[in-house]
Amino acid sequence: MAVYNADHKSKNTIKISDLTVSRGDIPIFDPVNLQLSSGDSIQIRGVNGAGKTTLLRAICGLCNSHEGIVEWNERSIFDHESDFYENLLYLGHSLGLKPKLTAEQNLNFYRNLRFSTDKSLVRQALEQTGIGGYYDEFVARMSAGQKRRVALARVITEPVPLWILDEPMVALDIHGQAWLEQVCNNHLERGGILLVTSHQPISGINGLRELQLT
């Protein structure tokens, strides 16, 4: 089982070259060229339907009808899948939570896929997100904002260098948004990489660049 240090001291790079996805024969967005190294962050912006989610899925290797190359540390993600996915945390529109499991059980499930069990860390993560008192609550009984916070707790329980977050601010109040921005800043200071989408401007993440999809 993989073990990671939360300080990502090794230099990491993700490079995206001429990446596009087509629906039928029609490209959803113009080819994207982008390179991010340790400590870099970027916000993908665009109107509804511009392809923000599709782009993130393509970067993660989850789209079949795509063209272009995605490289992690100068190697194609498809040639070295295990290395790429061990270092990736992707949180999409679908939160990936099992409604019949508790918040704690959901986080333990994901952590145990590549880390050793750490119940204290899982509960600390829920405390940090502001729902520590709900660790034994079934996800099915939670509000949309609480479910979002459970999913976002994975950024603490799974300390990997590459975060790809799709609309993470949805259903968060102003305090939740401020917490997430601070967690992202801590991640970048430790040498992490961040790609994020949001319909709204994000002002609290240091050095955040923007890419407008067309």
Image (cartoon, rainbow, N blue to C red):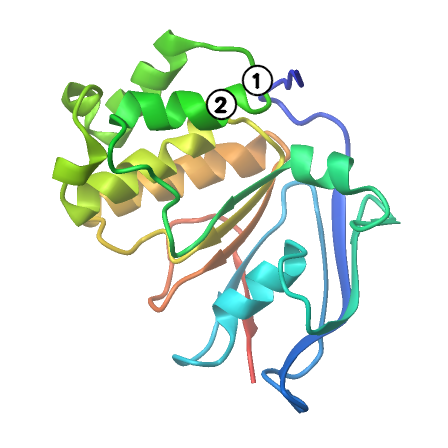
For the view shown, which residue lies furthest in the front direction? 100
Question: Which amino acid does the dot numbered 1 rest on?
Answer: Phe
Residue 68 located left or right of residue 2: right
User: Residue at left 78%, top 49%?
Assistant: 77
Q: Residue 154: which numbered mark, if any?
A: none
Question: What x and y, as percent, mark residue 156?
Answer: 44, 27
Q: Is residue 131 left or right of residue 59?
A: left
SS for callout 2: helix
Q: Residue at x 28, y 44 (%)?
A: 148
Q: Which residue is mark 1?
A: 115
Contact (CB < 8 A) between labels 2 and 1? yes
Closer to the camera, 31 or 98? 98
Q: Quadrant of residue 73?
A: top right
Q: Residues within 10 Å of mark 1 (few under 14, many from 20)?
A: some
Disc 2 from disc 1: Cα separation: 5 Å
| Residue at x 62% of width, y 58% of height | 62
Can you give x and y, in whole percent of width and height, for residue 48 in the image?
39, 79
- Label 1 SS: loop
Which residue is painted at 31% across and 53% down in the image? 169
Q: Quadrant of the C terminus?
A: bottom right
Q: Amino acid at mark 2?
A: Arg
- In the image, residue 95 sits, relative to residue 200, either above or below, namely above
Give the answer, above or below, for where 137 lies relative to 67. Answer: above
Residue 94 at what x, y percent from top left?
38, 53
Res. 111 mark: 2
Q: Is residue 175 left or right of residue 163?
A: left
* Residue 193 x, y percent position in the rendering: 61, 44
